Image (spheres, rainbow, N blue to C red):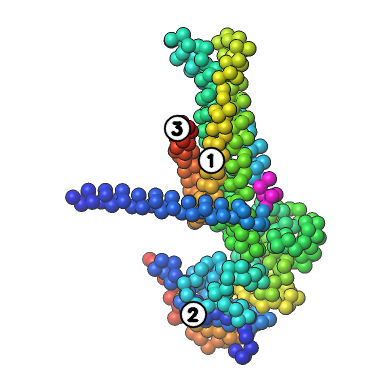
Amino acid sequence: MNALLDSLAAIGRAAIGFLREAGAVTLFALEAISHLARPPFYARRFGRALVEMGFFSLPVVALTAIFTGMVLALQSYTGFSRFNAESAIANVVVISITRELGPVLAGLMVAGRIGAATAAEIGTMRVTDQIDALSTLSTDPMKYLVVPRLLAGIVALPLLVLVADILGVMGGFIVSVVKLGFAPETYLHNTLSFMQASDVISGLVKASVFGFLIALLGCYRGYTSRGGAEGVGAATTGAVVTASILILAFDYGLTVLFFSR
Amino acid sequence: MSGALPRIRIRGLRKSFGAKTVLDGIDLDVPAGTSMVVIGGSGSGKSVLLKCILGLIAPDAGTIELDGRDLLALPRRARATERARIGMLFQNGALFDSLPVWENVAFGLLARRLVSRREARARADELLAQVGLASAVGELSPAELSGGMQKRVALARAIAAQPDILFFDEPTTGLDPIMGAVIDGLIVDCVKRLGSTAVAITHDMASATRIGDAAAMIHRGKIIWSGPAASLFESGNAEVDQFTHGRRDGPIQMELRR
């Protein structure tokens, strides 16, 4: 009986901890959003975050997209050739990349790269009193550290996903033409005639949400980190893991939302 | 204390973290133009006291007045304006490692849009000169500086906006005795030049006597003694005597587990 109660208590504690954390992240996000419309604005910080998140993430996102498109074409061929539907490969590649794989894989890659870096940088600032120093220098840390990153996340990830969409489709095109013997013009015609604007737009909307989540979790984990190097390490891990899980969960939610329309 | 309104007046300040009471009813007056040194052991609440005044930690109870205005009762914007009068030198410098030294020094000026970036660079050079650093240092990253240089840059940043109140958190911690004396000398020069009121917290007795006009000791969350800094070594208070002379035995018992 005691063992059962202990188990229930443990589950209860975990549930309360989860809810407390979810509440804290939500309040943090609301506070950050409340600063979006109130000056001062740190355009230089926003530009820097945009370059860091967008431009410097391009190589890893580009490689991920190209290889994903290539693998997708090969795997689709393996499956579709069993019922003579090889001509649908272009359609599958473009819809998979634009609606799903582009935003999700770019999101996961950027979460690993930027979420970790953000949590580490802000966490180090927290444990070395740099955030307190900002406050004593008439600077709101939320405005200076968090808001520019959130905006950069919202803007940078759709741009990255747009590039990922093009490169992913290109990866599928290369494999289909070079390895599987498709006619280039047929493949492109199939791709362009099947693709709809809503496919791309829904992917870009997802990307904006994922960019916000990545920046939010990185900032939140760093901002609330405690306890020196160990705390910063935990914040970094937590930022990447939580952002990755939330990307997958929100991906499902947004897909359901778009699916019903 | 005279009847004049002190620049900083603290009454009944309390702060607990969970079950641990750190500040247990602090009463402290710092007259205008005075350099007050607050001494006390590690974990005695000295830094928490400064952070409460700066608004970095919310106290549980009590009042903190600057020139008679209770900071905790002021609206948020007015409170921020009052607190902008305070310059702070953090224990480890707390320099922004993503910015070059000159931007660190001029950060407060730029943040309040008091100067253009070009003017800020020139002002940073002046401030670096005041703390004995060449303008070429301004282009370096804080990580490229020694501990003593970082402290001097942090001091330049603290005085950049010419605050009328200056706080120093363990200004000589981690420095060799000579560099410690240099930093203390710079602090005294800066405070005199600006005519500021200063509060320094330290457990470095040499530093305390160099910086302070007045001194107070915090122990178990209360101010247990205050008087002229010159009398720190002959205070007549058993706790202060034990602390200033670094005696192992006395009324202050360190909690050691064996």
Horizontal side, residue A47 vs residue A190: left or right: right
Question: In the rendered image, which residue does mark 3 sit on?
Answer: A260
Between disc 2 and disc 1, the foreground one is 1
| Image quarter of residue B35 | bottom right
Check disc 1 and report its element: helix, strand or loop: helix
Comparing A206 with A49, the one in front is A206
**Does mark 3 fall on the same chain as mark 1?**
yes
Residue under label 2, please give it. B12
Residue found at x 60% / y 57%: A141
**Marks 2 and 1, how far apart in space?**
48 Å
Q: CA distance from mark 1 to mark 3?
A: 19 Å
Residues shaded magenta:
A42-47
Mark nearer the viewer, 1 or 3: 3
Residue shown at the point (20%, 52%) measured from the top left: A2
Q: Earlier in the sequence, mark 1 or mark 3?
A: 1
- In this orientation, which residue lies closer to the viewer: A215 or B230? A215
Amino acid tagged 2:
Gly
In the rendered image, residue A163, in percent from the top left (x then y), is placed at 63, 30
Q: Residues within 10 Å of mark 3 (few under 14, many from 20)?
A: few
Q: Residue at x 46, y 13 (%)?
A: A80
Q: In the rendered image, is residue B152 in sight?
A: no
- In the picture of the structure, the residue carrying the numbered disc 1 is A209
